[in-house]
Structure formats: structure tokens, C-alpha cells
Image: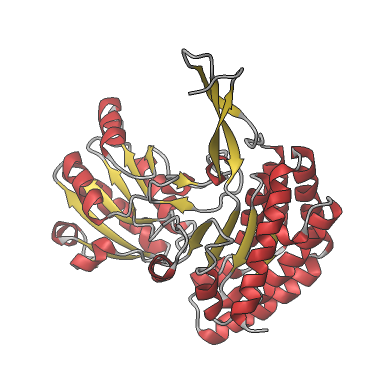
Amino acid sequence: MSVESEVMKMAKAAKAASKELACCSTEQKNRALYAIADRLFKDADYIKKENSRDLAFAKEKGLSDAMIDRLKINDSTIKAMAEGLKYVAGLEDPVGQLSQSWKRPNGLEISKMCIPLGVIGIIYESRPNVTIDAAGLCLKAGNSVVLRGGSEAMNSNIALSVCISHGLKEAGLPPDAASVIPVRDREAVTCLLEQEEFIDLIIPRGGEGLIRFVVKNSSIPVLKHYKGVCHVYVDEGADFDMAEKICINAKVQRPGVCNSMETMLVHKSAAREFIPMIFEKFVSDKVVLKGCEKTCQISAIAEPATEDDWYAEYLDLVLAVKIVESMDEAIEHMAKYGSSHTEVIVTRDYARARQFVRDVDSSAVLVNASTRFNDGGELGLGAEIGISTSKLHAFGPMGIKELTTSKFVVFGNGQVR
């Protein structure tokens, strides 16, 4: 069977399964999620064995340590995936809920009902936990999902898809409701993007190159997230101890993810004291520092930043640093160089915090907290399917609610127009 035929067959089967899934009960969906979680533990040795094959392949390809870290599955990863599924099972099911009810002068009673989107195609790189997170969220929201992970995680994703298939069968749901395309060839991505007859939405997760390729080649609506150029702005009069903890966490904890800090902005009145203090900590954590001219004058540790550094999503232990004259300049910098992902202000001034929250146009704006909190799990949504930096039809982390749409429901008693 050709790649095109195989992908079309899977998409068509997912469409058929979505009709059944959209009508099944919350209890049945939850049973499937718990069954998948249990299967992860039962098949843990098999999953880790297949993952070890992917890790060896990644090292042969020369992937960075940060990328290999995203690819790795161990006992704690399996536990986290299982707990994520159980958490999603415990969340309120939005499907079938009525909202925004009103009555017209002619007696028609109108409301909006939450319904699944249908079939979602997800294209992603590394991070095989996305296979479980995405399947769990899509299933709870009543959607079928066709998953196409990166070639570097192919063995891991196939192993995880076996767990998903068994869990669906145990719950009496169609196994085709969640499937992984078992093809390394990139032609599979192109074929998936042509299945507009069967797939309702494409969600790409990965580097900017992947996402731009998907947007350019898809005949299906795409939910976009080009990159995560996230900023922390240390305001005039900020608590330096708090700012230090936030900035270190935002950059160092997991530098290879989209909600890590890529640029630190510091108010000029705070720079002379704060920059040497935090640079010492960054250097001890092996962070490469790139600074504006004023930053380099304060600390010789930083190498001069270029214009490209302000746009950069490093996804590594590299940080751009700029001293700004005011909060307004910080906000202007974020608007010009940022990606509408995550912005943070560290401040003691409530009024300035309120202004920052109002004026910054990003999917998450935080006050006195790390960029790393722009995450579905951390915000209480359960495992997320991605972070949208476009505003149609969702903005920010996408949980269950963001994987649904609504239809109008009208009750009458014989009205005609």
C-alpha cells in the first residue's frame, strides 16, 4: 500500500470512528482513559525498550542534548502520562452542555450546545508523551485523532499507540478513534494535510520550520504556534530575589521547551545591581549570555547581541539580555520581537502590573511568576494539546474546552417565519 493510500485509509477510519465517539457517554470515554493509563504501566518495559531504539537513533543523527531530553521515556515519564490521563478523565466533560440560552419575542428558545470538532490531525516532533496527552484530550472532547510524530520517535509512538488501541477496545470504543501513522517518510505529512474530506483541524507542534511547512501545504484549517520567544521583564524597584528565582527557572529548568525564557529585559534603574548578580547564577548553570551594548558595559561575561538574537528561539542554554529605559520600551520590544506566546513582569507596583497585563498581547501574561507556567497542566486544564499563538479559534494552552465548538439549538412550538 502506498503512503498516500495508507494515510487516507487511516483518516477515513478516524472520520467513521468520530461519529460514534461524539455520541458516547462521559463514563465510556473515562473508562477508555483509565484503561490506557493502566496499559502504560503493564507495557512499561516494552515502551522503554522501543524508546531506547529511538534514543540511539537520535544520538546517531547528532540531535542536541535538549532534544534528546524531550525524546526520553523513563518510569517517571510513564507515570506522568498515566496521571495526566486520569486527571483528564476527572475533568468536566463539556460535550453536550448548553450555554448562552435566550428567548426570542416569537417564543423560540435558543441556546448553544458544545460539540466535538470531529477529527483532529496532529503533527509533532520528539516528545512522545504528546502521543498520550493529545490522544487523551481529543478522546475526552469526543474527537478522533490521527497522530504523526517525528521520525526520531517513531518506535516510541508506535508502542504508545498499542496502549491506546487496547484501552479503546476495553472501553468498547472504536480503536480507529486514535491512531499513529507508522511511516517515517515525510510524504506522510503532506498526505495528511490533503485529507480535508476526513480531517477537520490540523495542529502542528514543533519547530518554526515544521509549522510554516504545515501552514503552506495544508488544505485543512491549521491552528498555529510558530515559536516561543518568551520574555521576562524585571521592572524598576523589583524584588531581586524573586526576579532571580523566576528568571533562573524560566531559562534553566527546561531550556528546550517553548515556554522557556529567551530574552530577559531589565529596567535601567535595576540593571547595575541585578545583572551582575544574576549573571553569576546563569554562568554557574552554563547559560551563554548575549547582551545589548549597555549590558556588555556592565558585565564582560555577555557577548554582544545581534539583531537576530532578539528574534531567536534558542531552545537551549542561551539567553539574550537587554536594558530598557522604561516598561513601555519593554512592551514595545515584546511586540516587535516576540511571538505572542508568554510574557512576564516582575514588579512590586500593582498599577504597573495591571498596565502590563492590559497592554501585552500574548497568549499568557504573568505577573511575578515564571514563563514555565504557560502550560495546560499548570493552568488546570489537564494535559494540553498545544499552545496556540493565533487567535482562531483558541489562544493559549488548548485543553478539552478548546477542542470543541458549538452549534445552535432551537426549541419552538410551531413557529414559522
Instruction: Say whether residue 190 is visible.
Output: yes
Image check: 257 left or right of 24? left
User: Quick check: 18 above or below 366?
Assistant: below
- The image quarter in which residue 302 lies: bottom left
The x and y percentages for residue 99 are: 55, 26
Q: Is residue 251 above or below residue 55?
A: above
Q: With 408 as the anchor, is 325 left or right in this view?
A: left
Judging depth in this view, the residue of 368 and 282 nearest the camera is 368
Q: How is the image coloured?
A: secondary structure
Q: Tell me how many marks there are.
A: 0
Please name the residue shown 72% across and 42% down the image. 23
Q: Residue at x 80, y 45 (%)?
A: 31
x, y percent for residue 214: 44, 68
* Residue at the far front in the pictured view: 416
Residue 76 visible in the picture? no
Q: Give the image location of residue 219, x and y in percent.
A: 45, 65
Q: Measuring 77% from the left and 66% from the top, which residue is drawn there?
A: 162
